[in-house]
Structures are given as C-alpha cells and as structure tokens.
C-alpha cells in the first residue's frame, strides 16, 4: 500500500541496471510462444519438473523439508497421505500452485483470493488458514544464535484496510501503466510482505501471489523454470533485498529498487535457465541419454555442479543414467568428484591438469 500511495514518486528514477534486466526479460518473453509451438513435449516435461522444484523450494525457504523420494510421490496426482506437518504443508502448496497453473483464466488478485490461497496452503494442517491475523507479528531473523527484529509490520487492526488499499492501488497502477508491470508486481509483493497479513505462511503466500501474477501477466517462464527454486538458491540476497526496501516503509520513505532489482534478476535467471534447457534439447536430438548428459557437461555446465543441476537441465534423465555418464568423464580427467552423498560436487578439471 505504501508503495502505491505516491506512485509517481515511488516508480520514478528507475536505476539503469533494473531497466536492462527488464528489457532482457521482455525479449525472452517474446520467444515463449515459439518454443510452445515447436517443442510442446519438452515444455510439458519442464513444467512438471518446475512444479516439483517450486513446491519443495518455497517450503524449504521456511525450513520445511521433505525427503526427495517422498516429495516426488506427494507431487503426483495419486499422492500418498501426508505423514507429518512438513508433508501436509508440502501438499498444501502443491494444491495451491496447481490451481494457479491449471486455471483457464486468472483474475486480478484481491483480498478474498489471497485468503483462499492461504486456506488451500494450510488445508491439511491444524492451522487456521484463510484468515487475517488477529494479533501483531514480527519479521525476525537469527544471527549468531540471537534473534533480531528486522521489521515490525503495522498493527493487526489495520491489516484488512491496508490490504484492500494495496490491491486497489496495484490495479489502478496497472490500468494507468504507471511503471513496467514487473516493477508494479515487485511493489505489490514488497508491500504484502511488509503488511504481513497472516500469522503463518506470509512468505509462501507471497510467492504464490508472485507466480499468479507472472502467469497472468504473460511471463510464462514461471511454468517452466521455478522462480521459488531460484529464490531458495539466493535466499540470503532475498532477505537482504527485502530489508533494504522495507527500510522507511512505514513513513513512505522507502525505495522499491533493491527489491525490484532482486526480483528482476531472479526472473532473468529463470529465463536463462529455461532457454539453456531448450537449446540443450535442440542440440542433443538424436543422442541417447548418456550422450546428452556428457554434451551438457562439456558445453553448458559451469565449472562446478551437482547431480541435481544435471537433473534440472535434462528433464527425464534418471540419476543412475547421470552417474553412468559422468563416470567416463571422471576417468578421462575431464571431471573430478568432491564430497559424497547429496552434497557431492563435480568439478571441471582445468586443461593443464587433465
């Protein structure tokens, strides 16, 4: 709401680097339909993989972890019964993200709709989903074992009025084209998190709202490359960008740009990953799965990667096949393995070492 009270002031003076990111995003957005027309089967595979990543990552940001094999089972339509609180919250996010992705048409967000998403999110738990908070809450973090208050949201009695004003301001700003739609989306999410309208699940609800608006605004990358996964991988920057943009928020003296820069960077990275996967699929047509893995390692991988990076880049290739493909590269001196288990990394050997 605070970001939309004086919209011209809030949205003027966009930093040049944010404008560059938004330009890159819009160019990538323009290529989406081409990929959808030419490679529908690949995009369907990417969509399913991104779905599981989004569910796991958005919960993991809040410290809610589900074992990998259970996560894949719970993500299926014939899912088993959730066994504990973490699995119940995983299943709730699954249903909420599926509702967004499968909708024929998405409406502009409103207070009732956001509370509906919150209700879906907590439907399998004992928590009271779908209601605004009835007591004050705080945004806090831990440093060196000590609790630090990062931000104090407005009093709970003001929550409903602030939320309604926020969504009204967002809709008006979109209609009047007061800024790039992704800048307006960033301001919407920033203010939503500052209001902190529910007792539990604010972050996950905000990420669902982000995905909802990306899809509604035509940024289909949210279907094929997990925004939540990228936030999870950069969560320290996520929290820092929020802190920087929420400073002075109560008096309307804050700057939306640290958060806008971060969000635009996340979306840019998602488009880059999406297009890398499309390129890899085109370049490896006719190759078997092990050859596809080795091509990705030699031509597209970074200097370090983990098994899950290969899995994300090459949907449909099993972990066993990936391991079989990596072993010859290890023998040839192209790669070396560091660590073991889930934390194991594969490191490219410099040419002079090989």
Image (cartoon, rainbow, N blue to C red):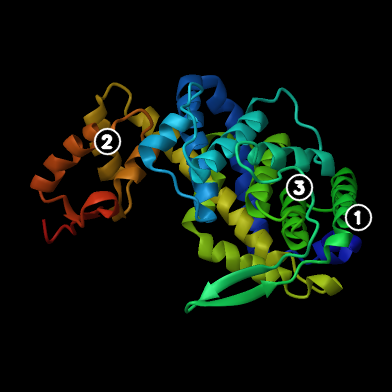
**Foreground residue among 61 and 179:** 61
**Foreground residue among 234 and 43:** 234
Q: Name the residue under label 2.
A: 319
Could you tell me residue 8's position as x and y percent?
Answer: 88, 62
Label 2 and label 3: CA atoms lie apart by 39 Å
Please rate how many residues cluster around mark 3, counting C-alpha atoms within 10 Å: few if below 14, some from 14 to 19, many from 20: some
**Foreground residue among 126 and 25:** 126
Disc 2 element = helix
First in sequence: mark 2 vs mark 3: 3
Please rate how many residues cluster around mark 2, counting C-alpha atoms within 10 Å: few if below 14, some from 14 to 19, many from 20: few
Q: Name the residue under label 3.
A: 181
Front tag of 3 and 1: 1
Q: In this view, does 239 lie above or below 121?
A: below
**How many numbered dots are placed on residues in this image?**
3
Q: Is residue 294 above or below residue 207?
A: above
**Foreground residue among 132 and 346:** 132
First in sequence: mark 1 vs mark 2: 1
Could you tell me residue 60's position as x and y percent?
Answer: 49, 51
Q: Residue at x 22, y 31 (%)?
A: 290
């Amino acid at each position: 709401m605070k970001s939309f009270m004086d919209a011209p002031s809030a949205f003027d003076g966009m930093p040049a680097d944010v404008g560059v990111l938004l330009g890159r995003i819009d160019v990538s957005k323009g290529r989406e339909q081409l990929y959808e027309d030419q490679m529908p089967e690949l995009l369907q595979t990417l969509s399913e993989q991104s779905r599981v990543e989004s569910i796991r990552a958005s919960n993991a940001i809040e410290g809610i972890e589900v074992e990998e094999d259970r996560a894949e089972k719970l993500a299926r339509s014939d899912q088993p019964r959730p066994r504990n609180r973490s699995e119940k919250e995983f299943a709730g996010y699954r249903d909420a993200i599926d509702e967004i992705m499968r909708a024929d048409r998405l409406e502009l967000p409103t207070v009732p709709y956001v509370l509906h998403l919150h209700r879906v999110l907590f439907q399998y738990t004992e928590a009271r989903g779908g209601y605004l908070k009835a007591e004050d809450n705080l945004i806090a973090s831990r440093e060196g074992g000590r609790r630090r208050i990062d931000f104090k949201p407005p009093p709970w009695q003001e929550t409903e009025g602030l939320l309604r004003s926020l969504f009204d301001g967002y809709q008006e700003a979109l209609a009047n084209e007061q800024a790039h739609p992704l800048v307006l989306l960033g301001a919407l999410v920033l203010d939503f998190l500052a209001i902190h309208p529910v007792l539990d699940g604010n972050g996950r609800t905000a990420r669902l709202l982000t995905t909802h608006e990306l899809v509604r605004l035509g940024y289909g990358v949210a279907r094929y490359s997990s925004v939540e996964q990228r936030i999870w991988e950069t969560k320290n920057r996520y929290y820092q960008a929020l802190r920087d943009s929420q400073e002075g928020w109560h008096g309307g003296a804050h700057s939306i740009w640290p958060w806008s820069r971060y969000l635009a960077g996340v979306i840019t990275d998602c488009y880059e990953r999406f297009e890398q996967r499309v390129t890899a699929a085109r370049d490896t047509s006719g190759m078997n799965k092990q050859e596809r893995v080795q091509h990705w390692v030699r031509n597209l991988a970074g200097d370090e990667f983990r098994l899950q990076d290969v899995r994300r880049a090459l949907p449909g290739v099993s972990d066993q096949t990936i391991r079989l493909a990596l072993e010859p590269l290890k023998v040839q001196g192209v790669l070396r393995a560091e660590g073991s288990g889930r934390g194991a990394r594969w490191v490219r050997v410099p040419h002079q070492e090989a």
